[in-house]
Amino acid sequence: MDVVDPDTSLLATGFHTDGFAVVDRLVSPELIDPLRERFERLFRGGFETGVPPDEINWQEGLADPTLTRQICNAWKADRLVATVVLSARLGESLARLAGWPGARIIQDNLLWKPPGARSVGFHRDNAYLAWYRPQQMATCWIALDQTSSETGTVSFVQGSHRWATDGDPAMEFHAPADYRAPMEEAAAAEGVRPEIVPVEVPAGGGSFHHGWTWHGSDVNRSNVHRRVLVLHCASSEARFHRPGFGVGNGPIYSRYAHSDDDVMDEAHFPVLWTASGHRTSGLDSLTDPL
Ligand SMILES: O=C(O)CCC(=O)C(=O)O
């Protein structure tokens, strides 16, 4: 079992030119079924470590079955999820692509779009992050099922990480009436016709994307499930930014701020890798040795 070491020098051109890069393999095939089992357990409310995730936006039997299921920071609840999203290799890849001295996890994301489930609205990740500086995120998206346009895979808008970053239109993540509308508004303001590229990969493949790249996903029109495990990182040097605490997902994550400094505590935002050799101590005890 392993997380594959992506060759970031090959991915860098796509990441910087297009705002994303697609990879055929990020995790080895033996991990896929065990991770799917963890999805089942987590969405039923089963938390292996006893610690709940930071955001539980869908639970079996309680939530709208037509929504895309979402849990954030399941690494706190499940050791196998932690094994993947706290990986030093993925942290290093994201830091190298983003040009940071290192990477810390801000959030993982478990997304599960069953047949018929509705869209995820187009958005840009950095727009939710006024609560820390530098206001930057880079993301690794790992498919646990083969993906296609039919299954409502994620789609990226080519080059949109270079569009203006001020004045984004309002964005809605879960099943908005028109999932492309805010991105199309931004494209019109930019004076461009958006080139939308779906990520079509085998299970275990995925993508890396820049925090300002517009992305979203359509309804799952197929009869197969579409599950992904997402790792969102910031620079290892990121610090809290109090004026943004009430904005985006600041109200959720600013609860971890200390009262007397702007340090992002490594207990909640662990450092996965730095070029100078730092990794938050004790991370390996949170993961599953398999
Ligand atoms: O998979 C999706 O539908 C959306 C994923 C996403 O928003 C992300 O990885 O940042």
Image (cartoon, rainbow, N blue to C red):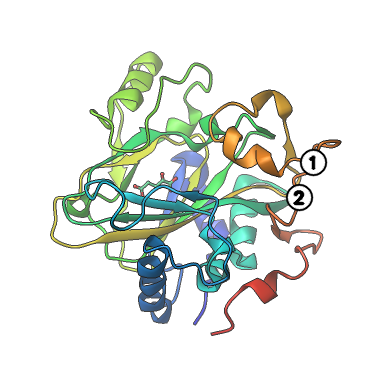
Camera-side residue of 277 and 257:
257
In the displayed image of the protein, which residue is found farthest to the bottom?
Answer: 290
| Within-10-Å neighbours for mark 2: few <14, some 14–19, many 20+ | some
Measure the C-alpha gap from mark 2 to mark 1: 8 Å
Q: Secondary structure at mark 2?
A: loop
Q: How many marks?
A: 2
Residue 147, given in percent of the width and then of the height, sits at: 26, 59
Of badges 2 and 1, nearer the viewer stands 1
Residue under circle 2? Answer: 265
Residue 141, given in percent of the width and then of the height, sits at: 44, 55
Q: Is residue 34 above or below residue 216?
A: below
Q: Amino acid at mark 1?
A: His
Residue under circle 1? Answer: 258
- Residue at left 41%, top 22%? 170
- From the viewer's perspective, is 251 left or right of 148? right
Residue 250, given in percent of the width and then of the height, sits at: 60, 34
Q: Is residue 281 visible?
A: yes
Q: Amino acid at mark 2?
A: Asp
Q: Is residue 129 above or below residue 68?
A: above
In the displayed image of the protein, which residue is found farthest to the right?
Answer: 260
Residue 98, given in percent of the width and then of the height, sits at: 61, 46
- Residue at left 35%, top 27%? 183
- Residue at left 64%, top 60%? 92
Residue 189: quadrant of the picture: top left
Camera-side residue of 162 and 88:
88
Q: Is residue 23 visible?
A: no
Would you say the residues marked 2 and 1 are in contact, meaning their CB atoms lie under 8 Å apart?
yes
